[in-house]
């Protein structure tokens, strides 16, 4: 999944693709680099970001979705608003990537149910301006797993088909750096939910802090690609369904190398063995 933010204030690429031509051109390049989906977002969800109104969000994303869909690019809509998702699906989007897991807008389940489209349910505890205060867990993996299971149950109760659901642990959303690393290390526990898992670590601040300069200055966002690729390969090796990244080419190349070693077959065998042990 290639990231396309048509926003002025996203943490990594805010403002770079704010006009239609640059956004569409970048979306096409992401597809050519190997993206199966181009994920279009019109509202920044970086920590501390203020919300925009739905009309502004719609006006940002719809023209880009229409143009990319016409160019044969498969598109997902990154939004937590049902109104935006509904308009995006009508314009040609195929997937709803909801960072709130359905919590921000109770009508989202209806939109997804009626459209019969895939729905990414991300672990979420609150909007960007308040997420830092919500990063309190007894056991972050167990707590995230429980809360994702609750979102799955709510979606199923609303009539969304089970085979339409994808989960996302929500790295960086009400999570500290330590929480992000713990979730990455214990990804199989989230896979035990039985649903495809989307993993999104791309260029996030905890990678910048890991790679900080001797004086403690975090590595700039554009220089976090090697770390992003490493986390993506680790996630896919653990069984993730997909990875959401800014630099598609680098990740696609790394995964091609991983696949050439026969690693997918070995990983699948390991997962089968794990599942049998769980069943026993």
Image: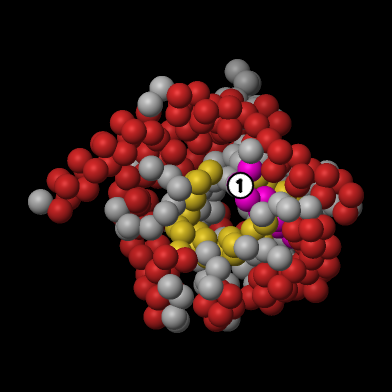
Q: Position of residue 236 (x, y in %)?
A: 44, 38
Q: Circle 1 — which element?
A: loop
Residue drawn at (45%, 29%), measured in percent from left and top? Answer: 259
| Looking at the image, residue 220 lies above or below residue 96 | above
- Classify residue 54 by image quadrant: bottom right
Magenta region includes residue 146: no
Whether residue 137 appears in this view of the structure is no
Q: Position of residue 14 (x, y in %)?
A: 78, 47
Residue drawn at (52%, 28%), measured in percent from left and top? Answer: 256
Q: Nearer the viewer, residue 65 or 136?
A: 65
- Classify residue 212 by image quadrant: top right
Residue drawn at (68%, 35%), measured in percent from left and top? Answer: 33
What residue sits right under mark 1 in the picture? 36
Whether residue 32 appears in this view of the structure is yes
Extreme-left residue of the structure: 280
User: Magenta residues, as a range?
Assistant: 35-42
Q: Nearer the viewer, residue 6 or 71?
A: 71
Q: Position of residue 263 (x, y in %)?
A: 37, 28
| Looking at the image, residue 19 lies above or below residue 234 | below
Q: Position of residue 136 (x, y in %)?
A: 42, 55
């Amino acid at each position: 999944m290639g990231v396309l933010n048509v926003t002025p204030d996203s943490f990594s690429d805010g403002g770079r693709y704010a006009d239609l031509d640059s956004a569409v051109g970048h979306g096409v390049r992401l597809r050519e680099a190997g993206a199966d989906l181009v994920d279009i977002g019109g509202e920044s969800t970086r920590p501390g970001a203020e919300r925009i109104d739905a009309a502004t969000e719609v006006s940002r994303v719809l023209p880009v979705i229409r143009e990319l869909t016409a160019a044969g690019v498969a598109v997902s809509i990154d939004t937590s608003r049902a109104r935006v998702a509904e308009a995006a699906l009508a314009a040609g989007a195929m997937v709803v990537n909801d960072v709130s897991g359905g919590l921000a807008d109770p009508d989202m389940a209806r939109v997804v149910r009626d459209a019969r489209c895939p729905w990414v349910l991300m672990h979420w505890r609150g909007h960007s301006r308040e997420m830092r205060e919500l990063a309190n867990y007894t056991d972050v993996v167990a707590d995230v797993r429980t809360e994702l299971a609750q979102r799955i149950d709510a979606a199923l109760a609303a009539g969304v088909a089970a085979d339409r659901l994808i989960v996302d642990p929500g790295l960086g959303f009400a999570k500290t750096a330590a929480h992000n690393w713990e979730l990455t290390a214990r990804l199989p526990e989230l896979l035990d939910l039985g649903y495809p898992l989307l993993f999104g670590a791309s260029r996030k601040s905890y990678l910048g802090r890991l790679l900080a300069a001797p004086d403690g200055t975090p590595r700039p966002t554009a220089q976090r690609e090697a770390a992003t690729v490493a986390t993506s390969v680790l996630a896919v090796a653990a069984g993730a369904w997909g990875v959401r990244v800014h630099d598609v080419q680098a990740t696609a190349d790394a995964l091609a190398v991983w696949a050439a070693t026969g690693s997918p077959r070995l990983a699948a065998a390991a997962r089968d063995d794990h599942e049998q042990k769980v069943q026993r």
